[in-house]
Image (spheres, rainbow, N blue to C red):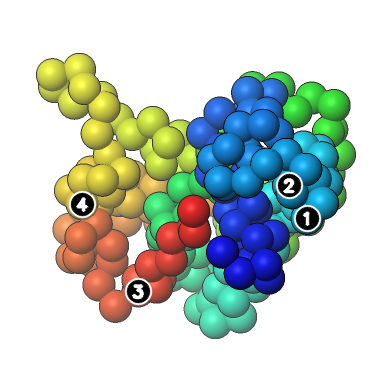
Amino acid sequence: MPAEAVPDRILDVATRLFAALGYDGTSTRLIAESAGLNIATVAYHAGGKRDLYLAVMERAHQAERAFLEATLAGLPPGAEGVRRLVDRYLDFCLDHPEIPALWMHRWLSDAADVAHLEGLYVKPLIALAAGAVREAAGPGADLDYAVMTVIWTTHGFCRGGVLGPDGRRTGPDDPREIARFRAHLHRLAAGMLNLPVPSPLTEETPHHGRTAGDRAPARRAAG
């Protein structure tokens, strides 16, 4: 492996392990072994486990912020804009499953000694999204709770899916379940913001679970 590629390799492996096992369940030794390196090399390039975790969360945040800013830059007004924002967010989480996983570990008190990340990263993005839908929202809508509910629901679907008739989980890998969840998310967002609730007959025809003509480019995490 070229020396210049080592830091990115370490960060990619750390992202995958923190997303799968959480910060508390991941050791520096495991990161080193999974990257095909020794602990000293990892420490030289990336520091300790806390340093790596902060770098992983910073990179995840930058990806989320870049996505949100790009989406809001071309957002149409009204209910159409709300649906597009919801669609793009779902697509983003499906394309980057490690990001919902990282945050959901924190919901379960993972990395409790690194307590400042929600205030540093999450709150500004919630405020940005809430501000973007403020004009579209009807009277009495709680914008912060509406945005957070979309986050909670989308993360839950992308990580846990739904139970099928046989009791097995399905969802993130099933285009029909993605389309079904997307339509549900449209109705949920409309209801929370006191907007006209779309009928299933007015929903766009899904393409592999994504609305036609409004699909985000697929990008997967390295490692």
63 is higher (above) or lower (below) than 22:
below
Dot 4: element: helix
The CA span between labels 1 and 4 is: 40 Å
| Foreground label between 2 and 4 | 2
Front: mark 1 or 3: 1
The amino acid at mark 1 is: His
Query: For the residues carrying marks 3 and 4, which lies nearer the camera in this image?
Result: 4
Which of the two marks, 1 or 4, is nearer to us in this view?
Answer: 1
Between 106 and 221, the one nearer to me in the picture: 221
Q: Is residue 38 above or below residue 80?
A: above
Give the distance between the C-alpha atoms of the residues marked 1 and 3, in whole angstroms: 40 Å
Name the residue carrying label 2.
Answer: 42
Who comes first in sequence, dot 1 or dot 4? 1
Question: Label 4 belongs to which residue?
Answer: 175
Image coordinates for residue 187, horizontal then vertical, percent: 37, 48
Q: Amino acid at mark 4?
A: Pro
Across and down, in percent, residue 103 comes to 62, 38
Comes first in the chain, label 3 or label 2: 2
